[in-house]
Image (cartoon, grey):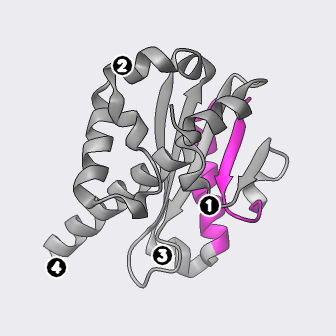
Amino acid sequence: MNSRLKFDIENIKSHTYLMGLDEVGWGCIAGDLVLGAVVIHKTFYQEIESWLIDHPWLLDVRDSKKLSEKKRKVIIEKFQSMNKKGLLISLIGQANIEEINALGLAKAFDVCVQRILEKSPSEMLILLDGKRVPGSLKGQNVQLVIKGDDTSFAIGLASVLAKVYRDDLMDRLHSVN
């Protein structure tokens, strides 16, 4: 087992769900802001050894910037096809260019968070890659994790999810023009 999984196991002990959050598109010159979220039930971590036997690719999950495009796509394909038994949920929050221009980046990020929270379990620990808690997460059970996408499995998987989703979106936009 790797340090990212151990980090999550240590942090989920007193919670039923753990959510990893990471964004892509912050400060980009084109395209939407995309926030990836992965919600994981603690049973997944309790059964991690058996999950790793059938899904050794779980050990490859890390900061999306440290993975090739091919590896990111493989991880997401396998993640989406595995039998999740309700233990793993992937969510996307997205703010389009019009929203970013009207609201600014920080408030657009909050819009993404709200869109994710509307579809999430209410009681969970949220692991957020970054150094500040955005306004939309004030009052939530949030733990900031510096370099979280390479420290936490849940944040790493959210990082890969967001990157693959946004890259696919940008490819579709490119093919339209």
What residue type is disc 4 on? Asn
Q: Which residues are magenta?
A: 106-134
Q: Earlier in the sequence, mark 3 or mark 4?
A: 3
Q: Which mark is residue 177?
A: 4
Q: For this view, does 112 lie left or right of residue 67?
A: right
What residue type is disc 3 on? Glu
10 Å neighbourhood of mark 2: few (<14), some, or many (≥20)? few
Dots 1, 4 in contact, CB < 8 A:
no
Dots 1, 3 in contact, CB < 8 A:
no
Dots 2, 1 in contact, CB < 8 A:
no
Q: CA distance from mark 1 to mark 3?
A: 29 Å
Considering the numbered disc 1 on the image, is that residue within a helix, a strand or a loop? Answer: loop
Front label number (3 vs 2): 2
10 Å neighbourhood of mark 4: few (<14), some, or many (≥20)? few
Taking depth in this image into account, of 56 and 171 the one nearest to the observer is: 56
Q: Return the residue at label 3.
A: 98
Q: Earlier in the sequence, mark 1 or mark 3?
A: 3
Q: Earlier in the sequence, mark 2 or mark 1?
A: 2
Q: CA distance from mark 3 to mark 2?
A: 45 Å
Taking depth in this image into account, of 42 and 174 the one nearest to the observer is: 42
Dots 2, 4 in contact, CB < 8 A:
no
What residue type is disc 1 on? Lys
What residue type is disc 2 on? Ile
- Look at the image and tell me whether residue 86 can be seen: no
Q: For this view, does 25 lie left or right of residue 103?
A: left
Membership of 121 in magenta stretch: yes
Taking depth in this image into account, of 125 and 95 the one nearest to the observer is: 125
Q: Which mark is residue 53?
A: 2
Q: CA distance from mark 2 to mark 1?
A: 28 Å
Q: Residue at x 54, y 54 (%)?
A: 150
Q: CA distance from mark 3 to mark 4?
A: 18 Å
